[in-house]
Amino acid sequence: MTQLIYGLVDMQSFYASCEVASREEYAARRKEFDDSTDPPLVVSGDPARRSGIILAATPTAKRYGVENAMRLGEALRLYPRLIVVRPHMAFYLHVSVRIQMLMQQCFPLQEQFSVDEGFIAFPYPSSLFPDPIAAARNLQARIWDQFRIRARIGLAPNKWLAKMANKAAKKSTGGIVWWREEDIPAFLHPLPVEEMWGLKRRAEVLRHKFKCETIGDVARLPVGVLKAEFGAWGEVIHRWANGIDWSDINPDSYHAPHKGFSHRTTLPRDFYERNEIAVVILELLDEVCHRLRHAHQAVAVWDLASPTRD
């Protein structure tokens, strides 16, 4: 019986990989299945002022304790010889679009999930896809050949399981993992409840209030108990814990209108004075309003200190 195989394709250390691949002195030494051949490079803010946070780090940099979202100054204290590169967002987006287009060429269904992730789906068994692992390996090889970026791919019967399988793929040697429906008790259920993608702070409630240490423990909770605690989310959690997801591939996700607009910045030091903080808030507000106007969205600003919002 033919079924759909879903995959989540994730680019390893995407921003950092783009920077390494674009520099001949580093790219020539890299190997597809050996991330220790990467230089200790990070993408961050202004290296002269040691401002900003780490947006991406190569596996080599991470082996020195450097992590995403860490302050650059702290990262340099851990390893002073870090190669620090300022972000080039337009370049990363350009590479992202080209990779997503490649995925569209290889598979009948594709959905961009983020700048460095995308879902795929294909019928199996079929004449075009007789071997899911081979199909994933072909995509992985083409991404490496064209962009010199390592892709990890999780394959599964649905999108949510594909995301979970992708986590396992990141720890595997070849970067590809295929979870079948019968693998759920062995591969999914022993995982810690905190690794259940999409839960966020709900994982803390499940662990402390319901004594759920693993995803299997969550799967064994009655759905009514979960709905009483989390409302409609309870039913979703129950399905996920049992390896069930009814989400479809959305090929138009890239062109979907934004549901929210935001902007952020990293300060070079701690701000305490009200007037300094106000300047930063106004700058952030100006950036958000600029994006809203560019998207032809209405802008309304309220003075939160005012008793009325006229």
Image (tube, rainbow, N blue to C red):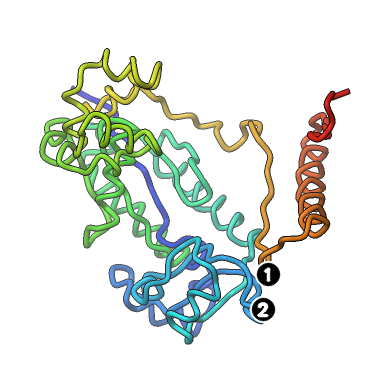
Q: Amino acid at mark 2?
A: Arg
On the question of residue 123 being in view, the answer is: no
Q: How many marks?
A: 2
> For residue 36, which quarter of the picture?
bottom left
- Looking at the picture, does residue 23 appear above or below residue 251? below
Q: Quadrant of the C terminus?
A: top right
Q: Nearer the viewer, residue 281 or 121?
A: 281
Q: CA distance from mark 1 to mark 2?
A: 7 Å
- Looking at the picture, does residue 151 appear above or below residue 254? below
Q: Nearer the viewer, residue 291 or 102?
A: 291
Residue for point 81% across, 35% down:
305
Residue for point 84% across, 31% down:
306
Q: Picture coordinates of residue 182 (x, y %)?
A: 12, 31
Disc ID at residue 49: 2
> For residue 291, which quarter of the picture?
top right
Disc ID at residue 268: 1
Residue for point 32% across, 37% down:
203
| Left or right: 254 in relation to 290 | left
Q: Picture coordinates of residue 9 (x, y %)?
A: 38, 48
Q: Looking at the image, do the residues carrying marks 1 and 2 touch, with CB atoms under 8 Å apart?
A: yes
Q: Quadrant of the N terminus?
A: top left
Q: Picture coordinates of residue 206 (x, y %)?
A: 28, 32
| Left or right: 295 in relation to 224 | right
Q: Residues within 10 Å of mark 1 (few under 14, many from 20)?
A: few
Q: Nearer the viewer, residue 299 or 74?
A: 74
Q: Secondary structure at mark 2?
A: loop
> Which residue extends farthest top?
224
Q: Secondary structure at mark 1?
A: loop
Residue for point 32% across, 33% down:
205
Q: Amino acid at mark 1?
A: Pro
